[in-house]
Amino acid sequence: GAVSSSVPKIEGAVGLIRERGDRLGATGLEMSKLSKDVAWCDRELSMPMEVLSSALLRSGRRTKRLGLELGAAIAPFVAQYRMCRYEQMAFVDRRTALKRRTEARSSADRRAAKLMMNQTSMQTMGRLGTLDKMEMEAAMSDEMATEAAKEADEVAIRLKSEVGRIGALRVKEWDSSMKVIASGMKEACSENAAIWEAALEAFKRELPDLVIPEMQTPQARPL
């Protein structure tokens, strides 16, 4: 259901965050190398590159740390996702038990009906041996039906108990995990914003004549 379809997407999103952190770090390293290569001939030009490489490296480290934190936080979701196969198998066992119960009861009812229809005639004809055999088969079929019903009830009780346990576990663990995820993402976004704001201020100090357009919030279009 929802777990089977959603958890892989969550894992994919965490993987993308880690990949973003790796790429930010790799880009920062390359930019740092470039700034050092440029510095020997144009120190002024290398300074903005150093600011950018430092921001990229810091942002990459913070993003990678966020990926690790989220990977740990979604562990309960992943564990429940892996349990889905066993849950499906449990419901298959329940359906199988119900099918066996229905078939066993139908067989017992057929034998009991056959015995009732032929009991008088066999007694009249003196076929007591055949009658005893039919009575034994009917009794055995009824016993098998009773056992099948008992097994189906036991499976139902175990399944109901397990579903309740897993449901309670999900509510407890998932609520805690969601709080950790939300807190971690909020903190990481704030720190990344601070990193790039500091980089912007450094750019302004290094290049005071550079005109940097201010970020503007898009205005809603009139209907």
Image (cartoon, rainbow, N blue to C red):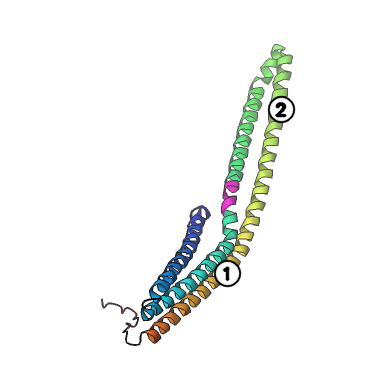
Please state which amino acid type lies under the numbered disc 1. Answer: Val
Instruction: In the displayed orientation, state which residue is furthest to the front.
Output: 40
Q: Where is residue 184 in the image (x, y as percent from the top left)?
A: 54, 71
Is residue 197 highlighted in magenta? no
Image location (x, y in percent) of residue 157:
67, 48
In this picture, residue 25 sits left or right of residue 117: left
- Discs 2/1, front: 1
Q: Is residue 173 above or below residue 140?
A: below
Q: Which quadrant is the C terminus positioned in?
A: bottom left
* Viewer-closest of 91 and 130: 91
Q: Quadrant of residue 150?
A: top right
**Mark 1 or mark 2, which is nearer the start of the sequence?**
2
Using the image, determine if residue 172 lies above or below residue 42.
above
Disc 2 versus disc 1: distance between alpha carbons?
59 Å
Compared with 151, 112 (above or below) is above
Circle 1 sits on which residue?
A: 180
Image coords of residue 86 (percent x, y): 60, 46
Image: magenta residue range: 81-87
Q: Which residue is identified by label 2? A: 140
Residue 36 vs residue 178: left or right?
left
Total marks in image: 2
Per the image, is 86 magenta?
yes
Horizontal and vertical percent for residue 79? Answer: 60, 55
The residue drawn where x is 74% and y is 15% is: 129
SS assignment at label 2: helix
Q: Which mark is residue 19?
A: none
How packed is label 2: few (under 14 Cα within 10 Å), some, or many (20 or more)? some
